[in-house]
């Protein structure tokens, strides 16, 4: 029985939903993400038994219970380390990590950067709702400065993280952003993340309708979305606002231009997922949407790099050691290098 | 010119304790280890105690920078590195000042005179820079002043080495001399140098020259009229190697993984004195060993949990402060009921404490140190060899009972070495993982359905039909689904505790290490105090006292025979390098009036200390 809010289509053969009742608040953005992940898994042709979901702590981290795959709901912030160990010994599995802004960027901040630099093969879904939900409404490391929350009645004094700039700084090999309110976009981005070998990190703007309702509505709602959201595609110019605005690069500095008599789409910066330097600029388009004349917030796949995964390098060392020294011989090991005999 | 006489007398000794001491850059550890190796190869029983400062190169010439290596070797069975030494070799004034109290009355001092110049005397804190080598204060000892620096330089005259490099060969001069003094030939040391410097001909030549110069100095100098000889010990027949505790732990883990047919995943973060386990394991990747130097202690254990979840043997090791950081993840591993071995190579605490000194003060941390009721089996090794046996047993318990296991060792046995009559792999028992291949409840799979030992199955990802979700949240009995039901919680807490308690069913009957099955006094020890307690107990028995010694390997759960055993003696003495942690556990569990002997100085007990305390208690 499926009790998630997902519906399955007739063509789908495998149902990835578990028999557990989903216990997120009604209206939570998590439902949308769960549904897209289930759909993606069902359409991917993966077998349930080869999929593993690892999570930390937080609302999002309940995710594994709602999928009929292998799942491990661990402790706060440590999912990246658990994933690293699992991946080292099981390169055959499809491993997904579910985390949030508090789990990944506050208590687990150290682990996430090391996961990224090592490039462990895992799909990381970072549900960003700019608030602590499960502990009932304290500011998070992505809450904007001045955010009034239960723990900051006079406004937050902390400068927030720009999550994807942090990911880029840690040399992440797949960097993308999507939103709960755009299921089609999310599914496409998740499919790309799944196809990537290495740490695929997808930041998903997720609305917490109880403690931080509307945090991303400027980017997600019909009226403002075209002006404030920029959807990037590989090989296509950075154009938004229904084709009336674009971003060009002049002296390696991005600028907003009006497309019309003076500039055309041909003058715009053409998105290249493989360009590490341009990706660094793209993740820095992070203006407060309340600011006049700021940059739109980009969505899509920003960067892809195919360097070797950590587990592949570990496995290669084991193979090389076996080639060089032969399969381990326990008796030779116990004997060591120097022995003497007493007769 | 007089031709030096080569007729020297040879005195036989049953056992000798020698302490090498100098600046931490003087190569003291290497000299000590080499001389140990030579004696072990010769057939002596040996026991060693390296003692070094926390700083890699503390200020030269100061007391803080003194590094020591104590070796006890004999033609008789040896249990400890020795209480006081017969021979003290000092490379400078600070080394003498720091160690003179460890020299027996009338013992021999071999001093490098170059290390007693004005500067060294001042740095060592000799008042008015009075030179103890010349002012008569050492009259109670046999003093040999040797200008090691000058003679090493002389021996290396003509080489192209710079003065600094020449001076680095001083320790080989000392090693050569000591080899002469104890009637050992140089073959083993020469072989070692050839291996170490084989490709660097110039350094090899210089070290060999210094080594031989030291040997010939003993032979030709008129100052030395007596050599000593320590005959081989009556060791059981067989083939031996030398092993340190950390090596033993690494090999025990690896042997366990092999016997369980599991890959070994070792997640660790560098920390003194546990890092050598990582160094050792990282050399054996051809056994399918994966070593992961994690970003921190938490990631080290969490990665090991991930590996165990995937079907490998997850292991992590650290020392006190690192273990503290792993605490939350230990609770997770306990809840998940997955195999995991956690090694704590204890050091002086609390907090950063005494990183290079030894202590047994993490017992309570191991037994009690988690939130909620999370009993984890705790076992402890008593000697470097025992580190192998207990690490192997840790793997057995973890894999066969689906539980994290804590193995306690400490800096004293981790770095100490002894001869090991190593086992053959065929003599090690097979270890059987509790794998499950299909549904266990009709068509369904219940991840927390327990067997008759209360052990749950190990269901590896990748197997169809066994998909399941587990986590740190309280779970329903059998299904493992999240449950906040009050009665279920109590049931689960009791079930998990029962599972761990039942591990005691597998222990062999408790065995006295020495002494009568009942009597006046039972000395109860655990961990690295083994040698000192055994030496004291044997001496007390020889003096006619009714004294027995039992050394506990299983600290949680206790061996079922321990309670009845404790009741068979009028008095119970518990020597520990802490304020009485085992004593309190024994009192709580068995209502026994155990008395403590507690030393909290970062240094092991001497057997004399235990002997005296036991006598006092016997007289009371």
Image (cartoon, helix red, strand yellow):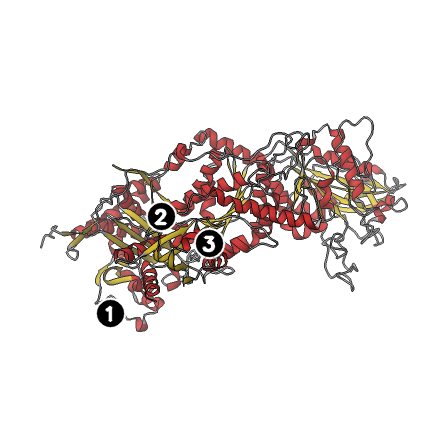
The quarter in which the N terminus of chain B is drawn is: bottom left
Work out whether A60 lies above or below B597. above
Q: Answer few, some or many: residues within 10 Å of disc 2's Cα (few below 14, many 20 plus, some between 14 and 19).
A: many
Work out whether B421 lies above or below B413. above
Mark 3 vs mark 1, CA separation in Å = 39 Å
Residue B324 lies, in percent from the top left, at 55, 55
- Residue at 38% from the left image edge and 34% from the top image edge: B424
Q: What residue sits right under mark 2 in the picture?
A: B417
Nearest to viewer (mark 1 / mark 2):
2
Q: What residue sits right under mark 3 in the picture?
A: B346
Residue B310 lies, in percent from the top left, at 59, 36
**Upstream in sequence: badge 1 or badge 2:** 1
Mark 3 vs mark 2, CA separation in Å = 17 Å
Quick one: A295 or A300, which is closer to the camera?
Answer: A300
Mark 1 vs mark 2, CA separation in Å = 35 Å
Which corner quadrant of the image does residue A266 belong to? top right
Q: What residue sits right under mark 1 in the picture?
A: B137
Give me the chain letter of mark 3.
B
Per the image, label 1 sits on a secondary structure element best described as loop
Quick one: B82 or B160, which is closer to the camera?
Answer: B82
């Amino acid at each position: 029985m499926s009790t998630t809010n997902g519906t399955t289509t007739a063509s789908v053969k495998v149902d990835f939903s578990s028999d557990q009742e989903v216990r997120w608040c009604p209206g939570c953005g998590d439902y949308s993400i769960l549904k897209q992940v289930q759909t993606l898994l069902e359409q991917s042709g993966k077998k349930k038994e080869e999929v593993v979901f690892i999570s930390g702590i937080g609302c999002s981290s309940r995710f594994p219970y709602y999928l009929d795959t292998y799942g491990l709901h661990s402790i706060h912030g440590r999912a990246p380390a658990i994933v690293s160990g699992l991946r080292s010994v099981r390169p055959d599995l499809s491993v997904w990590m579910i985390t949030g802004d508090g789990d990944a960027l506050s208590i687990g901040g150290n682990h996430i950067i090391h996961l990224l630099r090592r490039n462990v093969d895992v799909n990381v879904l970072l549900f960003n709702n700019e608030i602590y939900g499960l502990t009932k409404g304290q500011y998070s490391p992505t809450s904007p400065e001045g955010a009034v929350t239960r723990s900051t009645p006079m406004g937050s004094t902390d400068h927030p993280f720009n999550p994807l700039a942090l990911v880029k700084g840690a040399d992440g090999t797949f960097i993308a952003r999507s939103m709960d309110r755009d299921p089609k976009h999310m599914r496409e981005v998740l499919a790309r993340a799944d196809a990537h070998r290495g740490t695929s990190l997808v930041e998903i703007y997720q609305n917490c309708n109880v403690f931080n309702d509307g945090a991303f509505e400027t980017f997600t709602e019909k009226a403002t979305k075209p002006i404030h959201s920029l959807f990037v595609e590989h090989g296509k110019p950075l154009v938004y606002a229904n084709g009336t605005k674009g971003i060009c690069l002049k002296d390696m500095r991005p600028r907003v231009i009006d497309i019309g008599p003076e500039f055309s789409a041909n003058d715009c910066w053409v998105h290249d997922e493989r360009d590490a330097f341009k990706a660094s600029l793209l993740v820095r388009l992070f203006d407060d949407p309340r600011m006049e004349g700021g940059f739109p917030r980009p969505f899509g796949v920003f960067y892809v790099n195919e360097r070797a995964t950590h587990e592949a390098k570990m496995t290669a060392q084991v193979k090389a050691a076996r080639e060089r020294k032969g399969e381990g011989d326990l008796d030779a090991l116990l004997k060591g290098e120097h022995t003497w005999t007493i007769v | 010119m007089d031709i030096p006489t080569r007729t020297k007398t040879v005195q036989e000794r049953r056992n000798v304790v020698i302490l090498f001491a100098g600046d931490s850059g003087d190569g003291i550890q290497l000299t000590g280890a080499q001389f140990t190796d030579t004696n072990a190869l010769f057939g002596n029983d040996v026991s060693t105690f390296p003692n070094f400062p926390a700083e890699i190169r503390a200020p030269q010439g100061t007391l803080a920078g003194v590094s020591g290596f104590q070796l006890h070797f004999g033609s008789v069975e040896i249990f400890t590195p020795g209480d006081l030494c017969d021979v003290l070799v000092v490379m400078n004034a600070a080394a003498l000042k720091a160690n003179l109290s460890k020299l027996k009355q009338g013992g021999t001092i071999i001093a490098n005179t170059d290390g007693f110049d004005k500067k060294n005397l001042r740095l060592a804190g000799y008042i008015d820079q009075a030179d103890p080598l010349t002012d008569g204060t050492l009259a109670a000892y046999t003093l040999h002043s040797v200008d090691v620096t000058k003679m090493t330089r002389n021996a290396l005259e003509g080489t192209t080495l710079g003065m600094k490099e020449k001076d680095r060969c001083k320790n080989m001069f000392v090693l050569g001399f000591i080899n002469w003094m104890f009637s050992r030939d140089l073959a083993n040391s020469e072989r070692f140098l050839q291996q170490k410097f084989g490709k660097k001909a110039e350094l090899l030549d210089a070290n060999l020259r210094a080594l031989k110069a030291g040997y010939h100095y003993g032979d030709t100098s008129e100052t030395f009229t007596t050599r000593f000889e320590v005959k081989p010990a009556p060791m059981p027949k067989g083939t031996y190697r030398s092993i340190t505790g950390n090596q033993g732990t690494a090999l025990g883990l690896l042997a366990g993984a092999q016997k369980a047919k599991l890959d070994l995943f070792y997640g660790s973060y560098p920390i003194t004195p546990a890092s050598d386990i990582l160094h050792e394991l990282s050399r054996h990747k051809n056994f399918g060993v994966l070593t992961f130097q994690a970003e921190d202690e938490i990631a080290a254990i969490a990665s090991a949990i991930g590996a165990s979840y995937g079907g490998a043997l997850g292991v992590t090791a650290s020392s006190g402060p690192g273990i503290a950081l792993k605490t939350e993840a230990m609770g997770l591993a306990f809840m998940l009921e997955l195999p995991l071995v956690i090694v704590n190579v204890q050091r002086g605490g609390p907090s950063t404490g005494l990183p290079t000194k030894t202590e047994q003060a993490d017992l309570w941390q191991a037994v009690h140190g988690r939130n909620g009721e999370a009993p984890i089996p705790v076992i402890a090794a008593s000697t470097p060899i025992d580190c192998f046996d207990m690490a192997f047993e840790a793997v057995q318990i973890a894999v066969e009972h689906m539980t994290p296991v804590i193995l306690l060792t400490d800096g004293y046995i981790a770095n100490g070495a002894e001869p090991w009559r190593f086992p053959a792999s065929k003599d090690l028992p097979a270890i059987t993982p509790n794998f499950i291949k299909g549904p266990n409840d009709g068509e369904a799979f219940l991840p927390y359905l327990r067997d008759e030992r209360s052990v749950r199955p190990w269901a590896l990802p990748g197997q169809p039909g066994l998909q399941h979700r587990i986590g740190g949240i309280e779970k329903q009995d059998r299904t493992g689904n999240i449950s906040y039901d009050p009665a279920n919680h109590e049931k689960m807490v009791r079930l998990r505790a029962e599972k761990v308690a039942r591990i005691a069913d597998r222990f062999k009957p408790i065995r006295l290490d020495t002494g009568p099955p009942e009597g006046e006094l039972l000395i109860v020890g655990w961990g690295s105090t083994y040698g000192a307690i055994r030496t004291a107990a044997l001496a007390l028995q020889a003096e006619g006292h009714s004294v027995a010694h039992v050394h506990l390997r299983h600290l949680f759960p206790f061996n079922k025979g321990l309670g009845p055993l404790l009741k068979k003696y009028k008095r119970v003495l518990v020597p520990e390098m802490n304020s009485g942690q085992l004593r309190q556990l024994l009192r709580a569990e068995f209502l026994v009036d155990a008395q403590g002997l507690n030393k909290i100085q970062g240094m092991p007990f001497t057997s004399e200390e235990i002997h005296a305390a036991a006598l006092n208690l016997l007289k009371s």
